[in-house]
Image: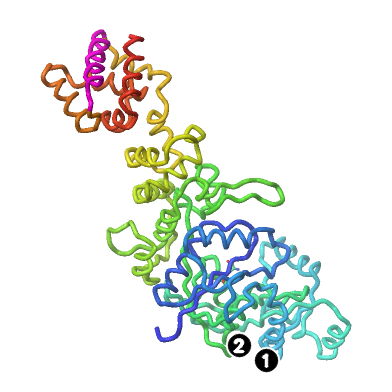
């Protein structure tokens, strides 16, 4: 690649960013960084009716949380700004006018009511109304009207839109990096609106004008934009511009593999579809986010990378750096990528193991009031012992409460299994051993208690089970000797005495 790679993520701020959008941003980022290029964030807010307060900041926060920052964009000036389309408003009209002047576009004066009438009329006949070559001369536009009539309407300030004049009987040859060559018969295309009566460009016009002016080399976006590709190609040609390269990413499918993943699927099956929590500014409804659900950004990035891409090897764990090195648009699939919520947990569990215990300890401490007065180093050591069983920080308390507070009850089923007739006598002997120990370490505890069990020929379970139950309250947790060492001699003695007294 000789030219400087420039890609853009171009979301519309119409609500929280779906993880599909984050995946699009990620693939753009990976591609840019792999080729030493720039990743641009452009906010496509030309549709004022769909503008949602806070959505733009949400998009920026999401990219930052994922660790895939943009090089240029709103709030990060570059040479091609402004990066918010509403601030570029005055720029688009000239291109629409050019297209009219070159005969590639025309003024259309049809009212909303008349278009609605045609639509309903067609529907009633089981047909779909398409505004294009086959009927445009019968409609209210500058191709059908005389030059004087058109002038009169324009001078009179009549509302109009500018439509692209889609050619008849041509075959377009489109190229997509992921999908290969695509042929389109222009007869099926409609004359899309490029410029609206409110003085704003539509997505199509603004999008290609900006991609051109911002020197975008590769357009990487979701499959839902594939139907727009034919128009975009024609617009580039009509304006005499080179087309960028295109790559349309596969849809993200429901866990069943059927249909597009929606927020409803997440609600039903209990997983978020947004990177960060989102509060709807109108309804105050709160939607869950991966961050708040306890996912690490590394896990999110890793699982998103595998939605539609694979490295062609068995390797599944990839740091962002490794993803940048391995990423290749040629290895992105055409077919939809099934979303697997269990796999996202699997990734999180993996990245949990890689987290620094001190950092985890700080987060854990903030989550539980019981830990307020506990030394952070102690919490950190506990985490080292239990995190192998944890997927989220919110799992920590269940896995570790006995390191911080003595059990107040003993699991009933486990008690029946562990507390037998001879148990009080056995635990009393263990207590004596413990009390006599000067050097209270994991290794001295292990050899003292295990040695005592062996030399007295007692079954291991007869000692270890009640011991664990006395310390933990259930038959769970890490190594018993680790627990004894961590809680210390005094606490160990207290917990054993309590059980002995109750038996
Ligand atoms: N504004 C469009 C969106 O919301 C951008 C599509 C594109 O990348 O061309 O996804």
Residue in the foreground of this view, choosing between 44 and 294: 294
How far from the left and from the top, in percent, is residue 494? 35, 19
Residues at circles 1 and 2 in contact by the CB criterion of under 8 Å: yes
Residue in the foreground of this view, choosing between 13 and 489: 489
Q: Residues within 10 Å of mark 1 (few under 14, many from 20)?
A: few
SS state under label 2 = helix
In the rendered structure, the answer to whether residue 424 lies left or right of residue 166 reads left
Q: Disc 2 designates what residue?
A: 238
Q: Residue furthest right?
A: 156
- Residue ID at (75%, 77%): 161
Q: Which residue lies furthest to the front in this view?
A: 438
Q: Disc 1 designates what residue?
A: 102
How far from the left and from the top, in percent, is residue 111? 81, 71
In the rendered structure, the answer to whether residue 372 lies left or right of residue 51 reads left
- Residue ID at (68%, 77%): 88
Q: Is the magenta stretch mostly helix, strand or loop?
A: helix
How far from the left and from the top, in percent, is residue 272? 52, 48
Q: In which quarter of the image is residue 298?
A: bottom left
Residue in the foreground of this view, choosing between 242 and 405: 405
Q: In which quarter of the image is ligand 1?
A: bottom right
- Residue ID at (45%, 48%): 256
Q: Is residue 346 magenta?
A: no
Estimate the spatial distance between the alpha carbons at disc 1 and disc 2, rounded to whole Å: 8 Å
How far from the left and from the top, in percent, is residue 425? 24, 10
Question: Looking at the picture, does residue 272 appear above or below residue 435?
Answer: below
Q: How crowded is mark 2: few (under 14 residues within 10 Å), some or many (20 or more)?
A: some
The residue stretch that appears in magenta = 421-438
Question: Looking at the picture, does residue 219 appear above or below residue 264?
Answer: below
Disc on res. 256: none
Quadrant in which the N terminus is drawn:
bottom left
């Amino acid at each position: 690649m000789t030219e400087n790679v420039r890609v853009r993520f171009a979301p519309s701020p119409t609500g929280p960013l779906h993880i599909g959008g984050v995946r699009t941003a990620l693939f753009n980022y990976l591609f840019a960084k792999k080729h030493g290029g720039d990743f641009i964030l452009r906010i496509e807010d030309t549709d004022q009716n769909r503008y949602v307060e806070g959505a733009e900041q949400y998009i920026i926060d999401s990219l930052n949380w994922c660790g895939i920052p943009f090089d240029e964009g709103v709030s990060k000036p570059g040479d091609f700004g402004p990066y918010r389309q509403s601030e570029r408003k005055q720029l688009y009209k000239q291109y629409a006018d050019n297209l009219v002047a070159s005969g590639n576009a025309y003024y259309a004066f049809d009212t909303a009511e008349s278009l609605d009438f045609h639509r309903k009329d067609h529907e009633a006949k089981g047909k779909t109304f398409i505004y294009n070559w086959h009927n445009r001369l019968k409609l209210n536009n500058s191709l059908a009207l005389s030059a004087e009539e058109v002038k009169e309407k324009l001078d009179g300030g009549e509302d109009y839109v500018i439509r692209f004049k889609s050619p008849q009987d041509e075959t377009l040859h489109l190229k997509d990096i992921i999908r290969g060559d695509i042929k389109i018969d222009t007869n099926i295309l409609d004359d899309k609106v490029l410029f609206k009566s409110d003085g704003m460009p539509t997505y199509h016009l603004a999008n290609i004008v900006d991609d051109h002016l911002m020197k975008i080399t590769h357009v990487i976006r979701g499959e839902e934009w594939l139907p727009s590709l034919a128009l975009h190609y024609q617009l580039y040609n009509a304006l005499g511009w080179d087309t960028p390269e295109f790559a349309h990413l596969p849809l993200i499918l429901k866990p069943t593999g059927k249909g597009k993943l929606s927020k409803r699927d997440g609600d039903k099956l209990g997983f978020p579809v947004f990177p960060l929590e989102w509060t709807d500014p109108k309804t105050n409804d709160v939607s869950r986010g991966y961050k708040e659900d306890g996912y690490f950004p590394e896990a999110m990035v890793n699982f998103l990378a595998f939605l539609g891409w694979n490295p062609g090897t068995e390797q599944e764990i990839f740091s962002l750096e490794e993803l940048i090195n391995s990423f290749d648009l040629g290895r992105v699939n055409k077919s939809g990528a099934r979303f697997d919520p269990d796999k996202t947990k699997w990734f999180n569990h993996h990245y949990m193991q890689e987290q620094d215990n001190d950092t985890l300890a700080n987060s854990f401490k903030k989550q539980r009031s019981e830990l307020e007065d506990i030394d952070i180093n102690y919490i950190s050591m506990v985490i080292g012992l239990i995190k192998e069983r944890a997927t989220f920080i919110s799992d920590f308390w269940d896995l570790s409460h006995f390191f911080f507070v003595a059990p107040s009850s003993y699991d009933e089923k486990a008690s029946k299994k562990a507390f037998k007739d001879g148990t009080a006598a056995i635990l009393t002997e263990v207590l004596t051993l413990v009390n006599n120990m000067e050097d209270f370490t994991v290794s001295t505890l292990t050899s003292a208690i295990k040695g005592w069990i062996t030399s007295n020929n007692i079954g291991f379970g007869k000692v270890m089970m009640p011991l664990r139950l006395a310390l933990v309250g259930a038959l769970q947790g890490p190594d018993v000797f680790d627990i004894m060492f961590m809680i210390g001699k005094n606490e160990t003695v207290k917990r054993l005495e309590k059980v002995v007294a109750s038996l």
